[in-house]
Image (cartoon, rainbow, N blue to C red):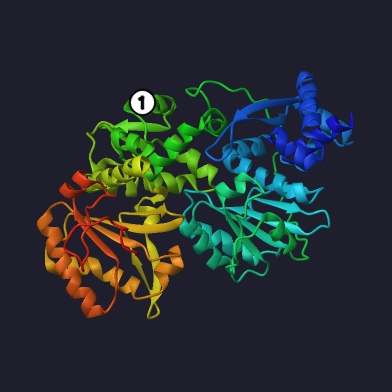
């Protein structure tokens, strides 16, 4: 039947489509695709595997079996080797797409949403090009789709965008980013591109075409996907990649238990809750299970249930009562986000240099993991704060939109021709009454002398003297400064009053200490300002 023929062809160009996506790209109805998939499955030409992520609901994804590959080559009048070389169907491609399956699913949802308003489409995956995929509209105009992964390194992704801009321009770039801060940063990088660039949060793009989720790199109002397609230029770039030197017919996929599964199958094996926990441990290495439970808003028993398969598969490890990603977990997230596995391990591995020696920061492989362990009391204090904030927000509001660890909280800016930076211990965004309320967190344990306090405050004075805080976040973030004891917090307020007056810079400081926070919670009346001695809520006044 024609529908079965078309489904084989579409799955040859875009493996691991689910039925709804296959219907959109093939042009057939959902009922026809379901029926064709069932018949092809009974004939042994198509196999399915389960998949779900934090952004995509549980579904079944289809791929061609070995018998299906032969059938496709036969119906297209090609040899098997030719069919494999011309499509993403080799064993290497199978592993690559499965490693990136969560990202693959979002890009397929985007392609399906485009097809709803512009059909038929051409679709192409890329292995090593800076774009992830390309889509050709019915008239030939092309779109390059680029996804920035949650764990992607800032510098590496900027280089990837540079390569993208230096290549042949498409009709437009569609860029998916994980959060609003990186959306603004990426928009600045793409503002000078030779083709229109449109950006959206990945979660909004996964939701479909009905939302006004897109904005141009030039800073347009929110656009629907249909409005974006109306602004695609008349360019038809369609880059080719060198075919693989070695063409290997893939084995049919057989799902096993997590203990024996290869890393590249975990995106299909893990449930969304397990993937979410992996992401949280990646964000907050050396986190205590109790703090993880508060971040998730679940009981200790539920945390243990989620962790069990992750620990069994060595994706996450429990070291001296704290949680870190294993080297397999680091590889899983790096490959999902097109990052270098060796760099992720060099930075974040908790594997001991000497397995026979006791745990100590000097005996940890990853340099950033080692640094966090070296200052474990400070690390634990930051974990306590973000966990308490998430728990209190879950009970009383506002909504926690974003919580970034220190390695994603740094901000860089130019002043007087030189590059400067602030390096907070965390960054977050809360939303109240539809308004974003960003904040930086500084947990101070060593700034107890006035001179040290002034030194700690100096980068923020320089930062808030510029327009960069608003450029980076769309609003001026509050700066939450926490001390271990009340006396140090009181002295810091005096130093801050003098320094801000001297510099003539208004920094939206909120200062507290641990005992008061433990009593009131991060969202309670636990914060003093330079202008007010009495504690108040951190966003009671406009920041």
* 134 sits left or right of 302 in the view: right
Q: Is residue 14 above or below residue 462?
A: above
Residue nearer the viewer, 68 or 136: 136
Q: Is residue 360 above or below residue 455?
A: above
Graded by Cα atoms within 10 Å as few (under 14), some (14 to 19) or many (20 or more), the crowding at tag 1 reads few
In the rendered image, the residue lying farthest to the left is 487
Give the residue drawn at x 87%, y 31%: 74
Name the image quarter holding the N terminus.
top right
Residue 348 coordinates in the image, percent (x, y): 37, 45
* 167 displayed left or right of 403: right
> Horizontal and vertical percent for residue 290?
29, 34
Name the element at disc 1: helix
Is residue 69 something that shows in the picture? no
The residue at 48%/44% (across/down) is 341
Q: Residue at x 23, y 34 (%)?
A: 357
State the image coordinates of residue 447 (x, y, percent, origin top left).
16, 61
- Quarter of the image with the C terminus is bottom left
Q: Which residue is tagged 1?
A: 304
């Amino acid at each position: 039947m024609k529908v079965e023929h078309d489904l084989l062809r579409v799955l040859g160009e875009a493996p691991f489509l689910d039925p709804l996506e296959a219907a959109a790209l093939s042009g057939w109805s959902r009922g026809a695709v379901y029926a064709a998939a069932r018949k092809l499955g009974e004939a042994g030409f198509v196999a399915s595997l389960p998949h779900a992520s934090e952004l995509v609901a549980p579904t079944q994804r289809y791929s061609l079996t070995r018998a299906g590959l032969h059938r496709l080559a036969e119906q297209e009048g090609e040899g098997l080797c030719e069919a494999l070389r011309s499509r993403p169907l080799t064993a290497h491609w199978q592993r690559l797409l499965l490693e990136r399956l969560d990202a693959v699913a979002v890009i397929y949802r985007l392609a399906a949403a485009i097809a709803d308003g512009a059909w038929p489409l051409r679709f192409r995956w890329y292995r090593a090009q800076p774009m992830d995929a390309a889509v050709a509209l019915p008239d030939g105009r092309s779109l390059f789709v680029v996804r920035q992964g949650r764990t992607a390194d800032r510098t590496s992704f900027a280089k990837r965008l540079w390569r993208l801009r230096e290549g042949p321009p498409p009709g437009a770039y569609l860029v998916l980013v994980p959060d609003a801060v990186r959306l603004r940063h990426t928009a600045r990088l793409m503002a000078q591109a030779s083709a229109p660039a449109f950006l959206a949060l990945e979660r909004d793009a996964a939701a479909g075409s009905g939302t006004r989720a897109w904005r141009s790199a030039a800073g347009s109002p929110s656009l629907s996907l249909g409005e974006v397609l109306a602004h695609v230029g008349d360019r038809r770039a369609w880059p080719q990649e060198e075919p693989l030197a070695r063409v290997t017919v893939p084995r049919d996929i057989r799902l096993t238990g997590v203990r024996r599964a290869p890393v590249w199958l975990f995106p299909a094996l893990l449930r969304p809750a397990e993937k979410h926990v992996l992401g949280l441990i990646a964000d907050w290495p050396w986190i205590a299970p109790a703090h993880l439970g508060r971040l998730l808003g679940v009981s200790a028993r539920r945390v243990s249930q989620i962790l069990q398969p992750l620990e069994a598969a060595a994706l996450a490890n429990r070291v001296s009562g704290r949680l870190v990603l294993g080297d397999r977990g680091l590889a899983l997230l790096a490959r999902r986000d097109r990052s270098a596995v060796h760099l992720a391990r060099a930075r974040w591995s908790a594997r001991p240099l000497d397995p026979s020696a006791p745990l100590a920061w000097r005996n940890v492989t990853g340099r950033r993991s080692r640094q966090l362990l070296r200052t474990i009391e400070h690390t634990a204090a930051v974990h306590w704060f973000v966990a308490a904030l998430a728990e209190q927000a879950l009970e009383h509001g506002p909504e926690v939109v974003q919580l970034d660890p220190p390695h994603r909280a740094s901000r860089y800016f130019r002043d007087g021709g030189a590059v400067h930076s602030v390096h907070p211990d965390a960054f977050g965004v809360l939303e109240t009454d539809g308004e974003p309320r960003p904040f930086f967190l500084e947990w101070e344990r060593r700034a107890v002398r006035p001179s040290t306090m002034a030194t700690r405050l100096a980068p923020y004075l320089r930062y808030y003297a510029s327009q960069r805080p608003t450029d980076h976040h769309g609003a001026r973030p509050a700066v939450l400064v926490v001390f271990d004891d009340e006396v140090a917090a009181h002295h810091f307020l005096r130093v801050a009053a003098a320094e801000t007056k001297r510099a003539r810079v208004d920094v939206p400081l909120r200062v507290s200490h641990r005992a008061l926070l433990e009593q009131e919670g991060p969202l309670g009346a636990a914060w003093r300002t330079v202008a007010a001695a009495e504690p108040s809520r951190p966003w009671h006044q406009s920041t």
